[in-house]
Image: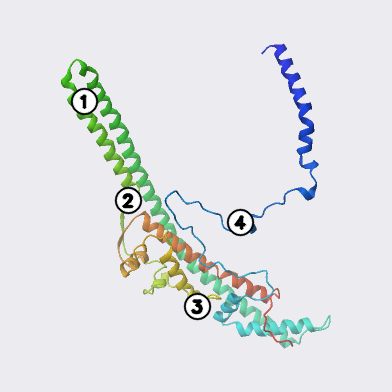
Amino acid sequence: MSFGLKRNLTALAIVLTQSLAPAVAASSPAAVPASDLPKPIDPIMTAPHIPIKPLKGRTRSFATPIFEKLTDPQSDELSPDAVQLARLLGIWEEMHRLAYLQKATAALPAGEKLILAEREEERDIKLDILTKVEETRLQIDFVVAEIDEEQVILEEAMRIFQEDRDNRVNRANQLAFRTNGVLWAVAEALTIPSYKYPTLSVPSGTVGIVAGIVPSLFSGYATRASGGGRYERKCYPNILTKLFDLPAIPRIDFPDVVWQFLNSAPCGDTRTRKQVMQEHWRDDQNIHIFKDGVDSKKISILTGNQAYVADMTLISDKLIMMGQVRAVALQMSRPLLEICMMVRGKKHMADTPSP
């Protein structure tokens, strides 16, 4: 680039900068009053559900939580779920007594304390409540650990199925490309001299027909292979067994408190949590095994109580259902948190009498 051209471009840039400077300054955020600036949008408050645009001609339901009305740890009073869990743990009366002692302590003049016996009683009640809360946490961990172990096995199987599917599809596509190219090359090679040797048009057309059929066969094979392989699995019961009222061995049995929680109804519902999950699974379009209804054979296969032939669809169904059971079990931690907050005086019970 010549020196004269560089000088002209530099001068043009300076002129443009000077002419655009007022417009840029007027449009800058500093020139706009703070009251006129748009307020930041909270995606959680304005759009709690992200809209999912379905494919053309095909509508699928988007997964939603099974239990949407959960407890609020920021409220002042214990939620109904926390009250329910406290009754299941057998600490409801102790919590009442603790709340009474806490109110009595708060009503004392500054510097005064409860008598020694009441202070020891308050300490013992707190220790007993927190011990039962910790035991419940370990029961939840027991369930989660069993689910995680089974999910690891299923995820490894899913990876095997996916690798097998990818290898089959890639192999079919490679053979389709190769045979298509070779056969069409032979067909065209026979077509070129057909102006001089008309009899070659017959084998040329024949090879052309084969060139159209063979890749189509490989494409059909690739389409069928997209579903992955099918492998046999021996009988290995999983955590879903007891949820479908089948006998459970100790490895997959639910601890007492977790099982009572699943067989209790959430606030505002007459169905137990176990029943809600079962209905959700039957109605969920993303769970394919119940697409044509529920029967004992499907339940036995789903729970692993009989040998079965597994494929990617069945593995996906199991992963979805076990993940949801895991989530429901971990939701017990929310009312447990409320109970601990009540022990520390951060929440109170609505029906506690004054001292």
C-alpha distance separating marks 4 and 2: 40 Å
Left or right of 173? Residue 55 is right
In space, the residues marked 3 and 1 are separated at their CA atoms by 75 Å
Q: Determine which of the numbered discs, if any, sits on residue 47 in the image.
A: 4
Circle on res. 229: 2
**Circle 2: element type:** loop
Residue 156, x across and y down, in percent: 41, 53
Q: Earlier in the sequence, mark 4 or mark 2?
A: 4
Q: Nearer the viewer, residue 27 or 105?
A: 27
Residue topped by disc 1: 204
Badge 4 marks a residue whose secondary structure is loop
Q: Is residue 296 left or right of residue 41?
A: left
Residue beneath label 3, please? 270
Task: Please name the amino acid that badge 4 sits on.
Answer: Ala
At label 1, which amino acid type do we have?
Ser
- Dot 1 or dot 4: first in sequence order is 4
Name the spot of residue 312 as percent of width and height, x first: 37, 54
For the residue marked with disc 2, what is the amino acid? Gly
Separation of disc 1 and disc 2 at Cα?
A: 38 Å
Answer whether labels 3 and 1 touch (C-beta < 8 Å).
Answer: no
Count residues near mark 2 (Cα–Cα under 10 Å), then give few for <14, some for 14-19, many for 20+: some
Image vertical order of residue 265 relative to residue 235, above or below: below
Contact check, label 1 and label 2, Cβ < 8 Å: no
- State left or right for residue 136 relative to residue 233: right
Q: Are circles 1 and 4 on residues that touch, CB within 8 Å?
A: no
Q: How is the model colour-coded?
A: rainbow
Measure the C-alpha gap from mark 2 to mark 3: 43 Å
Using a 10 Å C-alpha cutoff, classify the residue at mark 4 as few (fewer than 14 neighbours), some (14 to 19) or many (20 or more): few
